[in-house]
Image (tube, helix red, strand yellow):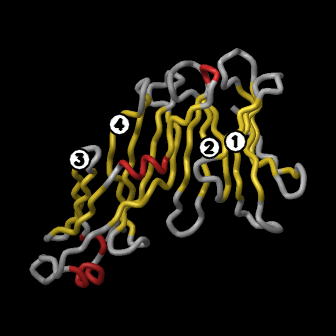
Amino acid sequence: MNILFRPQPLYRSEMILAEAMADVTGDGIADTIVLRGYPPSGDSPFLTEITLIVTVGATPDRYVIPLPTNAGYHPTLFIGDFTGDKVDDVLVSIDSGGSGAITYNDIYTFTGGEARLIFDSEYFNSQWNYQVEYLDNYKLKVTSEHAGLVFVIDITGRGPDYLNEIYNPDGTLKQPIQGMVEPVSGLFPVDLERDGTYELMLLQAVSGRYRADRFGYMTTVLRWNGAGWTMVQQWFSIYGANVS
């Protein structure tokens, strides 16, 4: 579907940030989906009071939805079927800005005469917990507690300068060190089965001693099961080292 990005003034500083036409209410008539927001001053790219508005068909009926996190950069719309009911849903994504590159992602469905929030990335962040630990012999272990999975990688590719700060000459740790997994920094619709129903692919940065000390990303794929989201698969995607 073609999404129109046409910032344009409405009144005062209010702007239309993204706009689309699609049948999201399931009545066979295209609805108008709009993201609206306010720049705080001048030409700043930071937007506040971002609101999702869905006008039902050719009627005056509207859903006006203040988003759970309604401020940030580059708000976008994606329209597609996430639940498998053959009716499009609405995904809103907003960048937080800053070094963490966090995104706020919310999915709404409008069938059955009501607007329902079926995915909220901030709730996902609160439920999916991780432990990141440096191990002896130049290893990093990431434990995905919610998924019940453990990932162990070799970090010798970081080089001697990095490793000598952390390890003794015999490969043992000088002291315990914990890393971190960041909140969601990207959500991407993917149709794994090519059946017209989208799964969610979420990326979370994995870092070591500090945020910029990044090793790669936890990648999680979720699928709607009719009542909630089920994990399809999860993996730890790592950066490669330069060939010597």
Location of residue 61 in the rendering, given as x and y in whole percent from the top left corner: 78, 27
Label 4 crowd bin: few (<14), some (14–19), many (20+), radius 10 Å:
some
Residue with the mark numbered 3: 149
Quadrant in the picture for the C terminus: bottom left
Residue 54 location, quadrant: top right
Label 3 crowd bin: few (<14), some (14–19), many (20+), radius 10 Å:
few
Instruction: Give the distance between the C-alpha atoms of the residues marked 1 and 3, in whole angstroms.
Output: 36 Å
Question: Which residue does the image show at 23% across and 45% down from the upper left?
Answer: 148
Residue 162 location, quadrant: bottom left
Residue with the mark numbered 4: 231
* First-in-chain label (1 vs 2): 1
Nearest to the eye among marks 1 and 4: give it. Answer: 1
**Local SS, label 2:** strand
Q: Is residue 136 left or right of residue 111?
A: left
Instruction: Give the distance between the C-alpha atoms of the residues marked 4 and 3, in whole angstroms.
Output: 12 Å
Q: Amino acid at mark 2?
A: Val
Question: Which residue does the image show at 14% across and 83% down from the upper left?
Answer: 168
* First-in-chain label (2 vs 4): 2
Q: Amino acid at mark 3?
A: Leu
Label 1 crowd bin: few (<14), some (14–19), many (20+), radius 10 Å:
many
Nearest to the eye among marks 3 and 2: give it. Answer: 2
Nearest to the eye among marks 1 and 2: give it. Answer: 1
* First-in-chain label (1 vs 3): 1
In terms of depth relative to the viewer, which is nearer, 129 or 197?
Answer: 129
Q: Which mark is residue 92?
A: 2
Residue with the mark numbered 1: 52
Q: Amino acid at mark 1?
A: Leu
Contact, CB < 8 Å: mark 4 with mark 3? no
Location of residue 130 in the rendering, given as x and y in whole percent from the top left corner: 30, 56
Location of residue 236 in the rendering, given as x and y in whole percent from the top left corner: 32, 52
* First-in-chain label (3 vs 2): 2
In terms of depth relative to the viewer, which is nearer, 49 or 7?
Answer: 49
